[in-house]
Amino acid sequence: MKKTLLALLVATSTALLTGASAEAAPPTPWSQIAPTLSPNFQPGSSNICNRGDNECVDSVIVEMQRREAPLDAACSHSEIFALTYLRTTAEYRASALTPGFFQDPAFINHQDALFAKYYFDAWDKYRAGQTSQVSPAWRTAFQAADQKRVSALGNLLLGMSAHVNRDLPYVLAAIGLKKPDGTSRKPDHDKVNDFLRTVMQPLLEEIEERFDPTVGLVQFEGTPLDDEAFFQILVGWREQAWQNAQAIVNAGSNPFARALVDAQIEAVAAAQANLILAATSYPLGIGRAQRDAY
């Protein structure tokens, strides 16, 4: 059953990365999208991601594959989150194409691209040595992977926490929490949880089979992290991200209120990273060699 689920997920992701048919043109390169990617959803824009085309998500997936492939080849511990993001985005693509799944799929496609850019930018700045421009939560995640300090579950949690607890509030606040008619975009935000639930089990099984057989043996906050427990943690983080986005919006142009919100977001994300680091670090270095050999 595990291999069947894994094969299905890999096949789906591969199909999305290569295109639905041999005749389909390759997606627009990310390098042509990123320079003019705007926080504002712009249906009339010449940028496919600003207007939320389905091709935008294809371009994001291809860029994720480009970044993930060398990490996989090198057995880098940073591969765990890169693979997770790739698999999750492929599942998002399938959901976004399902009629009625999202109320406003084009808007969510735009959000998906902007969200990915936060990760790409953090990674690129860290690798370029511009660490002062990288949030503490992301620095902890990247350093833990470079130092092979934590289990695969630790790499996964550190990346997810940095991206959700730190990045997501800013993305949500930037794109807007309400539709033009004044109604909330929260239903589509919550709908993301549905496809995250779908991807969680096969993802953890793939990590267990390919990278670290101990991925399901670690406890976090006193709970063994099976796919359901992991999913509930992620849902809680996403709910807090929405509330933090509301705090950003409410702060408006008041610099003191905004600074307070920013400080709180950074502090909580950093605290979560330290908690994960403590819970998933290899004791006295034991375990990393076995994982690499595996």
Image (cartoon, helix red, strand yellow):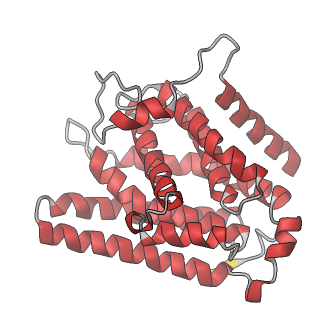
**Does 291 sit left or right of 103 as displayed?**
right
Considering every residue shown, the one lying at the far front of the view is 129
- Quadrant location of the C terminus? bottom right
Q: Is residue 254 visible?
A: yes
| Foreground residue among 31 and 54 | 31
**Does 204 sit left or right of 40 as displayed?**
right
Instruction: Say which quarter of the image contains residue 179.
Output: top left
Considering every residue shown, the one lying at the far top of the view is 23
Considering every residue shown, the one lying at the far left of the view is 254
**Does 54 sit left or right of 226 as displayed?**
left
Residue pictured at 74% horizontal, 51% vertical? 72
Residue pictured at 58% horizontal, 42% vertical? 89
Residue 137: x, y in percent? 47, 70
Looking at the image, residue 109 lies above or below residue 292: above
Residue 99: x, y in percent? 51, 26
Residue pictured at 56% horizontal, 63% vertical? 159
Residue pictured at 41% horizontal, 26% vertical? 48
Number of numbered discs present? 0
Instruction: Say which quarter of the image contains residue 106.
Output: top left
Q: Is residue 221 visible?
A: no
Instruction: Say which quarter of the image contains residue 240.
Output: bottom left
| Foreground residue among 165 and 282 | 282
Residue 184: x, y in percent? 28, 46
Residue 82: x, y in percent? 63, 52
